[in-house]
Amino acid sequence: MAINFDTLKASEDNLRKMFLKFYNHVLQSQDYLLKKFKVSKKLTPLQYAHIVANEKKANKMEAQILDETSWIISKDMPRAAHLRFLIAIIRSIKDLERMGDFVERVATNLQHQKNIDKDVQRAICKLMQYSYNFSKEIYRNIASGAHQTKNYYINRASVMFYEFSAKYRDYFKLIGEKIFRSRKDLNQKVAIFTAIKHIERNADHAFNILENFMYIGEPNFYFNKESRKR
């Protein structure tokens, strides 16, 4: 069993703060890109450099949390729910790292495109906003200290995720119709569709994080959960 419950609890509290700081950093990166893209279809070199720097910082934060988690396991020998908490953190920081990557990749794919249609720009912004709102909802739930209950998972998070999925399909069709009717070159079409796929994957990873935290209180969660409906 744990060497000292008080030191283990203090270590977990610190780790949770590190995780939430990491999550908030990723959210701020998403929000930054969304606000800049709403104003202009092309980022300035300075704005793009800021996004790249944020992604590099996210990689360092992931490494620091993984190192801290490994240290807690080695010194405190946690068991049961405490160990599941650490497993949830390890799994979730990889999701956050991917979410940070997606911000940079969306920016990269859109950065070098010229004359993006205004309707396409608005549709991309809408998708980014929906994806960001869902990611922030999961962050707020975890940051609140509330237990990730089955009721929240089914009646709040899942409903939001299904709504986002429906919006994604609608905007995907809208963007597709606009782009394929235009004379834009193939590279731009591929870049735009790649960008919106990254936006969709961002919401997927946010949902993964919630499921990782569900596992802390419900060890059989992964065995009993229903498949996501799309």
Image (cartoon, helix red, strand yellow):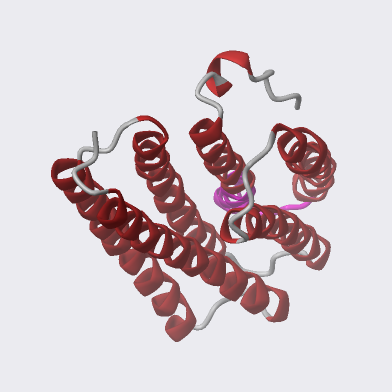
For the residue pair 139 and 103, the one nearer the viewer reads as 139
Is residue 171 positioned above or below 26 on the image? above
Picture residue at 45% right of the left edge, 58% below the top: 100
Image coordinates of residue 209 in percent, x first then y, are: 53, 43
Residue 191's place in the image compared with 212, above or below, is below
Residue 111 is situated, as x and y percent measured from the top left of the image, at: 52, 68
Above or below residue 47? Residue 21 is above
Q: Which residues are magenta?
A: 182-199
The relative height of residue 116 versus residue 178 in the rendered view (above or below) is below
Classify the position of the C terminus by image quarter.
top right
Farthest top residue in view: 223
Depth check: give the residue in front, 37 or 64: 64
Image-quadrant location for residue 45: bottom left
Q: Is residue 194 visible?
A: no
Residue sitting at x 82%, y 37%: 155
The residue at the point 54 percent across, 34 percent down is: 217
Residue 104 screen position, x and y as percent = 46, 61
Question: In x, y percent, where is residue 38?
Answer: 72, 75
Instruction: Residue 229: tell me if it is visible.
Output: yes
Q: Residue furthest left?
A: 75
Is 219 one of the magenta-colored residues?
no
Classify residue 64 by image quadrant: bottom left
